[in-house]
Image (spheres, helix red, strand yellow):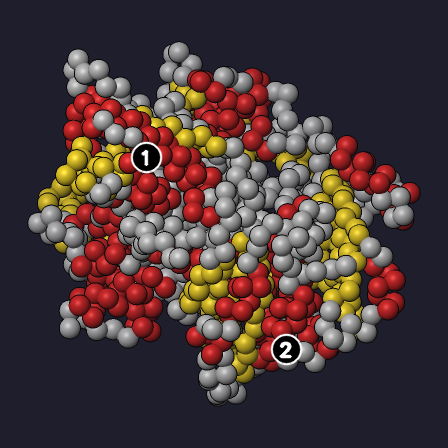
Amino acid sequence: MTTTYRSVHQRQPRLEGAAKVTGGTVYTADLRLHRMVHAKALRAPYAHALIKRLDVSKARAYPGVVGVFTAADLPQHLPRDGANRLHTVLADKEVMYYGQPVAAVVADEASVAEEALDLIEVEYQELPAVLDILDALKQDAPPVRHSMAGIDRSELAAHTTLAAADEQTTEKTPPNVTHRMVWSRGDVERAFKEADVVVERSFRASWTHQGYIEPMSGIVDCDRNGDYTVWTSTQGDFTTREGLAKVLGVPETKVRVNFVEMGGGFGAKIQPFGAVLPAIIARILRRPVKYIFSRSEDLRSADPSSQAYIETKLAAKKDGAFTAFKARAVYDSGSFPGSPLMAGANLLGAYYKFPNLEIEGLEVITNRVSQGALRAPGTPQATFAIESTVDIMAKELGMDPLELRIKNAVTQGDLMPNGRAFSKIGLVEVLQRFKETSFWKNRNGKPSANGKKVGVGFAVGGWLGGGSPSSASVELNADGTVSVMVGANDVTGTNTSFAQIVSEALGLPIERINVKTGDTSLAPYAGVSAGSKTLRTVGLSVQRAAQDALDQMFKIVSERLECSSEDLESVDGQIRVKGSPEKAITFELLGTMSTGFGSPTPVILGRGNVGTPAAAPGFTIQGAKVEVDPETGEVNILDAVCVQDVGFAINPLSVEGQIQGGVAQSLGLGFSEEMVWDDKGVLRNPTLLDYRIPTALDLPRIETALVEVPVEGAGPYGAKGVGEPPIAAGAAALVNAVSDAVGARVYTLPATSERILAALGKLPG
Amino acid sequence: MAKQIFRLKVNGDNYEVFVEPNRCLHEVIRDEIGLTGTKEGCGTGDCGACTLWINGAPVTSCLMLVGEGEGAEVTTIEGLARDGELHPVQKAFIQHGALQCGFCIPGMIMSAAALLRDNPHPSELEIRQGIAGNLCRCTGYTKIVEAIEAVAAGSR
């Protein structure tokens, strides 16, 4: 039986769209407050150095400067937490990455603050910097940082003891290795001996930037009560509150984070990097402090995505059955630990059934800016490695690469590397649906022309999906409209989807529903908008709150109409007796009853609060068709597709849009995006001209196909997370397509023209 | 640097601002005039978020000094809707789901509206060329191109 829906599962344009298209939507930088001052940071020109002398006296004396701050001026933040970059607001004696803030100038005008930066005198003593990921693994590497205080290596010790068979355990842990883990099952070595084909390769993925168009930004005020008010570009108002409260050493009740629209985050804006510095200065000055990163600062010293080095070894029988997978994954965390090693290493071996498996994962620190999340963190790197390896295996076996994937794809009950079994998943359904896409049908459409080579590639990707507790409220207003309040930051249209959910539950037209993200002193709690979880976690709370409100209304109506609640239905803004539509009470009347002066009827206030819902991994297959010029190495993307299991598309319009954006980003990781540092650890491309995120001309029309394998309890109507799966596989698909086109393979992301020419033997590798 | 008086005409309204002559046009429009729909994403003319019209031509206003705006008809995203009615491109962007975070959208729409004014029936390639200077990180451009195509089809 097909259920018909009135509001959910419908293509619903964004309810706040008019403000966005007219310039009316407010972002942090748009705000100006009375007595507001502007902060600018002086950033270190070295990747690793000691600060021998720091003289800010001339900057302090500069007209218009309100204050100059160094680590020595912020004693309330000591002792700092060495493992946590948030607590290292300004470099304290040691610079650990290029672009690390060393001092901050505050002035009435941003331009004055910037001018005064030039007057700060710093004497550095340069130290040897560890930059290459493999150098960081070495026993005799110089330490990335003098102080390892606060960096927890106990887990590392535990894991190395467990893996007693490993040779490394007898050695002392190298100084820059901050985490090591091993997952294994079966007997990989025996399986390799008994295999018909073994493929063994190694891969690298470069540092990349999330590329949000709105730079990091924050405004913080602090009044005489010690109450902080915050406006900042963040994915999580509540996580911002938590982070700031910890750094400031104040209760969370003292920090109020207002919702302002965020101009893109993609994982980078989980930690409140834009708000910490202004918060501390606001505490000292008791004035609102505005801090906006320049684009160059943002590219140099925000929290980009880590590089990785991954070795793979895959064994198969002649019929294509995979028998063993062994891998070693190294993730570079930059100067602070916290890389996505576990997520990446797990997904590396999670797409296929491997009876025998061994994955070793290592996290190293280097003298680079500390890494942050980038949409399915760790996954594009891991997917590039496994999906390149699988493509090579298909070639070695002489099998169709899609059939090989279908044959080995995981289904419910199969084990991930971490030993957990998959719940209900839709990978096989996704792979089958791929054959029905226009992309697949037209894959052989265009012949190579002008000496250019055309190739088709695809890759599987997935993301397990995060989760966290959440809550929401649904309240009936006097005029019969409904106000919904959540604490989740809306990035991709979640508030519109919440309105659809409430509309469906209440039988009320969506125009009469207003969803707002409240500030942290008023809104029901929600976790950070990350991990592909906002709609499925907060959406469940919204659904429950709507049901709670409806139950309350049914109770009132059943008493009024002297019938049972079971006999009632809510349709088109009125609650009526089933089969007798003339017996009805409108939402307007209920609103009046529940708010009127002297009325005995209670306010209709629905509440929904849920813990972390059931896991709902989302899988995709992505395809790319490319045209490669073998003379120049230039890649032109002709077609792109993403088939994704979304569980249930609450709003297919926004689901498609989010998938297309993820595909675009993943293709960027595939062919153009790379942070380029010189051998001193200085970033050479800190502009959006040189850090190349795809333009409209770089991309084709991106086809999407939604597969719906709903998982009950995972999200409203069985919805799964959408945001992250589509970035997992695009880079791998593109590299497979390039390989199909030119017959040579690139082993380092991105597959730039230079790397393609090197793979063809036309440039030194 | 000593402040000076500059006279700007923005969205048909006349303004006098007293600012340093080294201020960029988008800063003055945002901070002095208070029209914050024009965004700054890079400050170096690479992202297109600051796109507005000078005498009808789309420009990246972060590369212009305030004085360069004198004597010109400046149109910002706030001036695109007429008599309370959204411009067809604005309507289409909402209807076709062409916006997500929205930060690039004012600049994107200014480029798209200029394109369609000069070339009412562009090919897909012409559309992509028209907005190639406006970076969007959320949408992958597909729904933006569809929205622009829909406006073009509607004007046939």
Distance in Å between CA atoms under marks 1 and 2: 56 Å
Q: Residue at x 29, y 30 (%)?
A: A564
Is A550 situated above or below B102? above
Residue most toward the left? B83
Q: Residue at x 71, y 47 (%)?
A: A418
How many other residues sit within 10 Å of disc 1, few (<14), some (14-19) or many (≥20)?
A: few
| Observer-nearest of A238 and A56 | A238
Q: What amino acid type is highlighted by mark number 1? A: Glu
Q: Nearer the viewer, mark 1 or mark 2?
A: 1
Question: Image quarter for residue A108?
Answer: top left
Indicate left or right for A639 with A675 as reference. Answer: left
Which chain does the residue under circle 2 lie in? A
Which residue is tagged 2? Answer: A400
The image position of residue A682, as x and y in percent, is: 60, 49
Is tag 1's residue or tag 2's residue first in the polypeptide sequence?
2
Which residue is tagged 1? Answer: A566
The image position of residue A84, as x and y in percent, is: 61, 31
The image position of residue A684, as x and y in percent, is: 55, 54
Residue most toward the top? A225
Tag 2 secondary structure: loop
* Camera sees residue A57: no
Classify the position of the N terminus of chain A by image quarter: bottom left
Q: Residue at x 17, y 56 (%)?
A: B87
Classify the position of the C terminus of chain A by image quarter: bottom right
| Observer-nearest of A306 and A373 | A373
